[in-house]
Amino acid sequence: MNTSTALLTDHYELTMVDAALRAGTAHRRSVFELFARRLAGARRYGVVAGTGRLLEAIERFRFAEPELEFLREQRIVSDETLDWLADFRFGGTIWGYPEGEVFFPGSPLVIVESSFAEGVLLETLALSILNSDSAVATAASRMRHAAAGKPLAEMGSRRTGERSAVAAARAAYIAGFSATSNLEAGRNYGIPTMGTAAHSFTLLHETEREAFEAQIAALGTGTTLLVDTYDIEQGVRTAVEVAGPELGAVRIDSGDLPVVVARVRQLLDELGATGTRITVTNDLDEYTVAALAASPVDSFGVGTSVVVGSGSPTMGMVYKLVAHENAAGEWVSVAKKSAEKASVGGRKSVRRAYDDRGVATAELIFLGDGPGGEPEGAELAGITREVLAPLVVDGVVQPGSTGAAGIAAARSRHEARTRELPIVARSLTRGDPAIPTEYR
């Protein structure tokens, strides 16, 4: 299998490089910025996800002979550009919001400083990964808050593309989900996997009792039995008769869940299965999870809603050139001025401001010399924290953002950063961002 990521891009990225090489402008030092003008779905905050995947993809961004041959056959770029692509290795520097971090409108989530040609080639790749993964993570984060501490499992593989399902499981785990049903996500990323049986297993057998007996024989009494294939109350009674009061859990996938859950809990207790847990599925989203959080539900399984961003399948991120060196070697700020699509030019650094209780109050974006330095006027912001971190330095991916260690760090970071947000951030209603973005 070809693992190159070089053609996971749009046609015009390569034609821009071709034209810039011909014009002699391709090697001008440039700064590209990935950001969202607004939060999709009027969310109160966004969650950065996909950074580790992007860095791994950049390391595999190589034009080997199969990629070059395709470009040659299609006559997409000139022979001179093909020669340049054959030797391509990203050698620039990338700063960004670490994975798991929260963000707001205008937050420069990824800052690429490189030649124009190097930076523009990464546009589609960066947007396709971060737009999708961050949408999933943002939805998952809302669900985690709605669940009020009860565990959630991601079960949406069959509701999205087969590769997207793996990425979605990763993003949901970073945002606080405890497990996934997707085995490839478990293998690739070390995410705990879970699952027992579907309705088809019950329907395969002559009776529900026979199905439960077969499952218990294979998986033990600690398994989860699906009790709503026929009559839920009878299913619960049969489950406890077969497994005994040590039955691990029952799963409910249909019905008026608040009413059904209460009755199932009552029935389990009456049957002596006081330690048997209740898990619910059935097209849950953050609103139904919130409605059930105070009920006797012990855990949730979320499918479609989380993998499609719960109504916001993309975060609306864009990737824009914000500065470049001119022919004299001087930095020039540039910005798009189109109505409702304007960008803010210039190299930037970011600080998040906090009150004396440690609650975030503003996202401060400083225009100046870019990330890594002390922005002018930062002393006026009071208690602040640097947000941007170096992800790639002179073409070398920095440690800590990829692999299992990167996922663990992102998961912990997300937990810490969401605790810092004002309480309005947990609101499920559409509204303004939890904190304002201020340019300095």
Image (cartoon, rainbow, N blue to C red):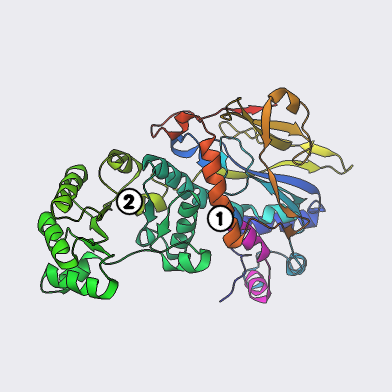
Q: CA distance from mark 1 to mark 2?
A: 22 Å
Is 186 in front, or is 119? 186
Contact between marks 1 and 2 (CB within 8 A): the answer is no
Q: Tell me if I can see residue 408 in this picture.
A: yes
Numbered label tally: 2
60 inside magenta stretch: yes
Placement of the C terminus among the 4 image quadrants: top right
Type of residue at label 2? Phe
- Looking at the image, is mark 1 or mark 2 earlier in the sequence? 2
Give SS at disc 1: helix
Tag on residue 408? Answer: 1
Which residue bears the numbered disc 2? Answer: 300
Farthest residue to the right: give it: 328
Q: Which region of the structure is painted magenta?
A: 53-71
Residue 357 in the image: x percent, y percent?
57, 27
Type of residue at label 1? Ala
Residue at x 20% of width, y 56% of height: 273
The dominant secondary structure in magenta is helix
Placement of the N terminus among the 4 image quadrants: bottom right
Residue 122 placement: quadrant: bottom right
Residue at x 78% of width, y 34% of height: 374
Is 66 in front, or is 370? 370
